[in-house]
Image: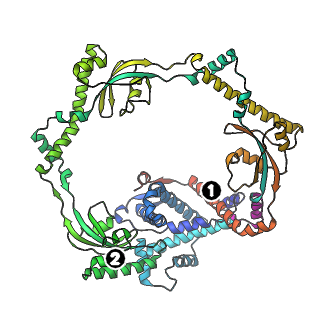
Amino acid sequence: MLQIFHNYKRSFFLVFVIATVSFVMTGFGLNMGSSRNNQVAVTVNDHEVSIEDFYRQRKNLEQRYRRMFGDNYDQFAASLNLNQQIIDQLIADELIKEEATEIGLVPSKLAIQNLLMSTGLFDNGYDANTYRAFLRQMGMTAGQFESQARETALVGQFSELLTDFSYASKNETRSILEINETKFDVDYLEFDPSEFVAQVEDPKDDELQSFYEENATDYETEPEVSYYYVVFDPKNYLEKVEVLPEDVEVYYADNESKFRTPEKIKARHIQFTFGKEDDPKAMASLKEKAEGVLQKAVAGEDFEGLVAQYSDDFVSKANGGDLGWFERGTQNPALEEAAFKLKGPGISELVETDYGYHIVKVEDYQEPAVKDLDQVKAEIEQTIRKEQAPAYAVADAYDMYDQWTKKAVPLDQFAVTKNITTGVTPELMSAGKDPEGYRGLTAKVIKDADISEQLVELGDKTILVGIKEYAPSEIPQIDFVKAKVVEAWKRIKSKELARNQADAILNSFLSGEIKTMKEAAASIKATLQTQSELTRTKGRTGVFTDPEVSKEIFRTYNENSMPESVHDVNGKFYLFQVSKIIAPKPEDIDSKIASTREQESARAGRLLFASVINTLKAKAEIDVNQSLLTSQF
C-alpha cells in the first residue's frame, strides 16, 4: 500500500482534509427504526452494512441539506440523489477502514477524544443531559456513537497518512502560480466565410448539376397527405350508455373505499424552529423552551396568545396557528401522528420533526365514514358512463367503417348520408402537422398511406380517415430547388475561400515573408483583432474557450512566434499570435503562495483520494441492495 502512495505522489501533492470532514459528518445520523435491521444495504468484501446504518446516515444527510436549502429543499431533493451519495460513502468508508486496518493503523485515544470534543458538546465541561439530548438527536446509544467515533478517527488517521505523501511544496506551488498568473496579449485574424460569398461566381450548369447529384438527398421532400376524417369521441357517447340500478349497486359494493370520507381534524399549532447553525446544545435548549410552553397550554392558557408569543411559523402565526381541517398524508407525519392520536379535542404531546418542535391543539375531530348509496348514486352512474363510453364509440366507429367501405364512396359523401360531421385538412400536410386537437393523426395516416380508407386509433378516440391526395417523398428535379442548391454551393465555396486565405497567410509566416499579425492584417486589408491579458485560470469567452486555441496560446514561450495552425471554430477560421507575455511580479506570487498551496493541495488531494478508492474498488467484492438505487423517497 505504501508503494501505491509513492506512485500517487508523482502526480498529486495535496492533503485530503475535505474528505476527512465529509467522513466525520456523514458518519453520524438518526435511527430510522428497527423494522429494517435484518436487511443489508451494502456488502463490501465480507463486511455487511445494515439498512439501519444506511437510513441513519441518509437521515443525517437529508437534515444537513434541509438546513442548507431551508424552505427550498423540496425543489432540489430529487436532483440530490441522496441514496447514491450514501451508498458511495458507505463503500468508501468500509474500503478505507479495511485498508487502514491492513496497514496497521489503530485509532489513538487522543484522536477519539479530539473528535468527541469537536462536537462542541463539552466546551464547558461534560454535561450528561446535553450528551443524552445529542444522542437522542442522532438516534444512537452512547456505545454506538463512541464506536462510530473510533471508526471515524481511524479514517481521519488514514487521511493524515495521505497528507504525508501529497502535500504541495512551496516551490511546486510557486511554479503553479507562475504558470497560472502569466498573462498573454494576443493578436488574431478572423476569416468569416460570409464575407467571401460575394467573391463566389455562379456555378456553371454542369458544376451545379454535379453538386446537386452528390447532395440530392439533402433536398428530398417529406411525404404529405390531405384527407377527410370523422371522429368518434367517447364523450359523445356518455348518454348512450345504459346504466341499470344493479350496475350502480355492484359498483358501490366493489368500490366502497372510494366513497369513504377520511378521518379529519381541525387544529392549531405552535412551532419552534431549529436554527440553521444550531448545535445539539441549542437544540436541547429549544426543546426545554417548547416543553415549558406545552405546560402552559395544558394548564389552559389561551392557545392563540401562546401562538402569538412563541410560534416561529410566521404563515400560520397571523391566524392563531390555524392549520384548518386536514387529513392524514397532508402534514408532517410526526405532527399528524400526535394530532390524530388524540381522537378528539385536546393538546398533543411535544412533537419533534426535521425542522423543530411543535405543540398541536386539536379543536374538532371527524371520524371516517362511508357515504350512503343515495349520496353517490349520480356520481357512480357518471363514472360507469365514462368507463363504458369508449367501447360504445369504438363499436360505432367499426360499424360505420364497415358500411363506408362497402359503399365504396369518398368519406365526405358517405358522411352526408349518415348525417355525421366530417373534417378535412386544408392542404397537403406532412407528419407533425395535424388538424387542431388531433396531434399525431397525420403521421399515423402517412404510415399507412397505401390504404385510402383507414380506421385510426388516437388516444381514446377512433377516427375514420379517407385520403384525398397523397404525395410521397421524392427527390425533386433541380429546377424546382435551384435557388437552394446555388445558395448551398456558394456557402461551401465561400468557406473554401476563407480557409484558403487563412492558409495563405499561415504560409507567409512559415516562409518568413510576414513576421507579425499586424503585417498580415495589412497585407489583406483586414481588421486586426486583439485580446489582452488572457490567463489559464480566469474566465475566457468567445473563440478563446476553444481547447485547441487555448492550447496554442498558453504553450507559447516567445512573443511574436509564428502561428502554429489555422483554427476552425464555429464555422469561422482563425490565426493567433501572442504579441506580449507578461510574467507575474514576484511579490504578487509571494502574497498568494499560502492560500494557493492549500487550494491546490485540496484539489490534488481529492484526485488522490478518488484514485485510491477506485484502486480499492477494483480489488473488492461489492454488492449493493438494488432497491436503494431505484428508490429516492
Q: Could you tell me which residue is drawn at 71 percent across and 31 percent down?
A: 495
Q: CA distance from mark 2 to mark 1?
A: 56 Å
Magenta span: 166-179
Q: Quadrant of the N terminus?
A: bottom right
Q: Could you tell me which residue is drawn at 17 percent across and 50 percent down?
A: 256
Q: Is residue 485 above or below residue 143?
A: above
What SS does tag 2 mark? helix
Asked if residue 178 is among those painted magenta in the image, a careful observer would answer: yes
Asked if residue 128 is among those painted magenta in the image, a careful observer would answer: no
Q: Quadrant of the C terminus?
A: bottom left
* In the displayed structure image, the side of residue 212 where residue 146 appears, left or right: left
User: According to the image, label 2 marks what residue?
Assistant: 308
Res. 611 mark: 1
Q: Is residue 120 above or below residue 10?
A: below
- x, y (%) of residue 84? 48, 55
- Asked whether the residues under the numbered discs 2 and 1 touch, taking CB atoms below 8 Å apart as contact, a structural biologist would say no
Type of the residue with mark 1: Ser
Q: Earlier in the sequence, mark 2 or mark 1?
A: 2
Pick the front one: 220 or 522: 522
Q: Nearer the viewer, mark 2 or mark 1?
A: 2
Is the image coloured rainbow, by chain, by secondary structure, or in one colour? rainbow
* In the displayed structure image, the side of residue 44 where residue 164 appears, left or right: right
- x, y (%) of residue 28? 47, 69
* Occupied quadrant, residue 31: bottom left
Pick the front one: 524 or 84: 524
Q: Dot 2: within a 10 Å radius of its alpha carbon, few (fewer than 14), some, or many (20 or more) residues?
A: some
- Say whether residue 104 is visible: no
